[in-house]
Amino acid sequence: MIDINYLTQSPDWRWSYSRLRQFEMCKYGWLLKYIFELPLQRLFFSEYGKLMHELIANALSGSLAWRETETEYIRRFHGVLQHHGPLGGVRAGYFMDGLKYLRSGGANLAGYQPMAIECFVEFEICGLPFCGYIDLVARDEASALCIVDHKSRALKERGARRHKSNALLDEYLRQLYLYSIPVTAQFGQPDKLVFNCFRTGMLIAEPFSRAAFDETVDWALRIIEEISRESNWLPCEEMWKCRYLCDMAGECEYAA
């Protein structure tokens, strides 16, 4: 078992949504990444996401004009293509989707007034240290305070019969509910949690829910408790996730 004190007493240790979610996805990957600290493998989807996040942030902050992000995107995308990734058709589709979004000038965010862009935050939950990077805090056209997360995944709006899509939204919303803690401390309680699905140009906005926030806090504390009691560290062994989403694949004997 892992003594949680070993982790939390380190001056550099912080819990985060990604660290908790990694444990849910693959316990063995969590062990390799955070305890053994093995080298990370660069992956197409994560590299693509980083590139788009950087360019959107640069445009919103004014350090680059939207038309300049297009040129920078084309110049740097070749490096993303060199990393281990899915078939060429998928990569080409991602390239065109990103290019279309940048050429639109971030049209779906046109009415949003940025208050914080790509900001690093630190906060606590029940005395446990957390951290994260918030893509965007902004007010929309109606002056609602929004936490915005840029997503390469083509999410769908919540629907009565979309059980899998709804569950995926709830999973991703946990990150934004965690971020609502430092946002509330600085700006006040957010009105909306928003996903900017830039590949489709869709904005998916959910009203802030106190019940969902409480559930997220309970989830975070439960996962930390599970980590403290874990002893088997079983791998996920889902081929697609292992090959394309796990940055421990290069170090994992279970990887396909």
Image (spheres, rainbow, N blue to C red):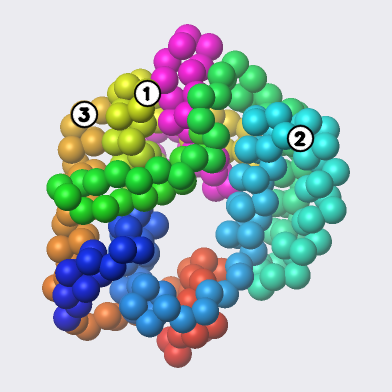
**Res. 173 visible in picture:** no
Q: Which mark is residue 64?
A: 2
- Marked residue nearer the N-terminal end (2 or 3): 2
Which residue ends up furthest to the bottom in the rendered image? 253
- The residue segment tinted magenta is 137-166
Question: Is disc 1 in contact with disc 2, using a CB cutoff of under 8 Å?
Answer: no
Amino acid type at image mark 1 = Phe
Q: Which mark is residue 187?
A: 1
Q: Residues within 10 Å of mark 1 (few under 14, many from 20)?
A: few
Query: Marks 3/1: CA distance?
Result: 17 Å
The residue depicted at 47 percent of the width and 29 percent of the height is: 137
Residue 190 covered by magenta stretch: no
Q: Quadrant of residue 145?
A: top left
Q: Position of residue 161 (x, y in %)?
A: 36, 36
Does residue 191 lie above or below 77 as drawn?
above
- Marked residue nearer the N-terminal end (3 or 1): 1
Q: Position of residue 253 (x, y in %)?
A: 45, 90
Q: Residues within 10 Å of mark 3 (few under 14, many from 20)?
A: few
Amino acid type at image mark 3 = Arg
Query: Marks 1/2: CA distance?
Result: 26 Å
Amino acid type at image mark 2 = Leu
- Marked residue nearer the N-terminal end (1 or 2): 2
Does residue 89 lie above or below 34 as drawn?
above
**Res. 148 visible in picture:** yes
The residue depicted at 64 percent of the width and 41 percent of the height is: 199
